[in-house]
Image: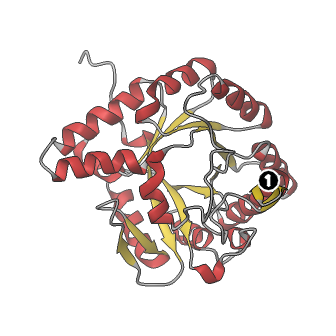
Amino acid sequence: MLAEVHLQRDELIAPLFVRSGSGVKSEISSMPGQYQFSADTALETVRRWADRGLRAVLLFGVTDDKNKDDVGSFAWADNAPVQTLVREIKRVLPEMLVVADTCLCEYTSHGHCGPLKEYRDGCFDVDNDRAIEYLARAAVSQSRAGADVVAPSAMMDNQVAAIRASLDDAAMPRTAIMSYSVKFASCMYGPFRDAAESPPKSGDRKTYQMDFRSPRQCMLELQEDEEQGADIVMVKPAMTYLDILSQVRANTSLPLAAYHVSGEYAQIKFAAQAGAINEKAAVIEAVSAIKRAGADIIITYYAENLANWLN
């Protein structure tokens, strides 16, 4: 009765990895209990989630090398995995809120979040201005497929403004934008990169994701996304950045999402498998801490487990 934090299914978003093909359900070795699905097998899982009271999914695309190129053009193809599954979910479960991750790294041949350009002899970085053009194309394609929310995760400057303008020009002003506003260059993304098959072929993403040693930069990133039209803002990762989550909560009135990321999931999962901790207790404590720090929305690979445990 006196507890101040109560977890609710309505606050959870369940991530899902979808790839081209059919009959695919492949467990991710670095994330036990998580899978790559094709659209047909994914739909079975989303139906089960809906039956257990989950109301929102976040879709990540996975594709074969043959569909990858220097700019990530498959991200805005009508038959891309995310767009394909969005249409299927909306056909069968129209009440399910569908969030589409909007990035290029899963579709570029080099694994970065946009096309590369040379800025010094032999040194390359992402071409920010071209990247936001392509991110906007992807967002419009996902929205046309039926996505309720697009979630730009590339951390490109002005990506929210570009996407908002393109959605408005395409007569889709009701599509919401959940921006990865405060996204750190974290080692906690390792299992995700296995799942999405998207590690950079060279270099890293520290030139466009945030330095974990620079917390004041968060407020600048947050302010920019708010001014550009974000409807929801996000902090990623969650567990290792509860201080940042609390600061962001104090500085925005927008809905705030927090991403309990793959490495944080794996830490609990492998520790529980080793008998070091009680998995259920650890998950409920961790996710309660994320909510306690200020999150309105929690993206977690433990969403289905929580839906069961919250009974």
The residue positioned 72% from the left and 65% from the top of the image is 144
Residue 301: x %, y % from top left:
38, 52
Residue 302 visible to the viewer:
no
Left or right of 98, for residue 10: left
Q: Is residue 1 above or below residue 21?
A: above
Nearest the viewer among 94 and 301 is: 301
Report the side of 204 relative to 303 (left or right). Answer: right
Percent of width and height locating residue 240 = 42, 33
Quarter of the picture containing the N terminus is top left
- The outermost residue toward the front is 121
Q: How many marks?
A: 1
Left or right of 7 on screen, residue 158: right
Residue under the image location 39 percent in, 24 percent down: 292
Residue sticking out furthest to the right: 169
Q: Position of residue 270 (x, y in %)?
A: 24, 52
* Residue that carries the numbered disc 1 in the rendered image: 132
Dot 1: few (<14), some (14–19), or many (≥20) neighbours within 10 Å? many
The picture quadrant where one finds residue 28 is: bottom left
x and y percent of residue 63 in the render? Answer: 57, 75
State whether residue 248 appears in this view: yes
Q: Give the quarter of the figure containing the C terminus.
A: top left
Indicate the quadrant where residue 109 lies: bottom right
Per the image, label 1 sits on a secondary structure element best described as: helix
Residue at the outermost top position? 2
Residue situated in front as seen by the camera: 236 or 145? 236
Q: Amino acid at mark 1?
A: Ile
Would you place residue 195 above or below residue 285 in this image? below
The residue depicted at 45 percent of the width and 54 percent of the height is 190
> Of 78 and 73, which appears nearest the observer?
73
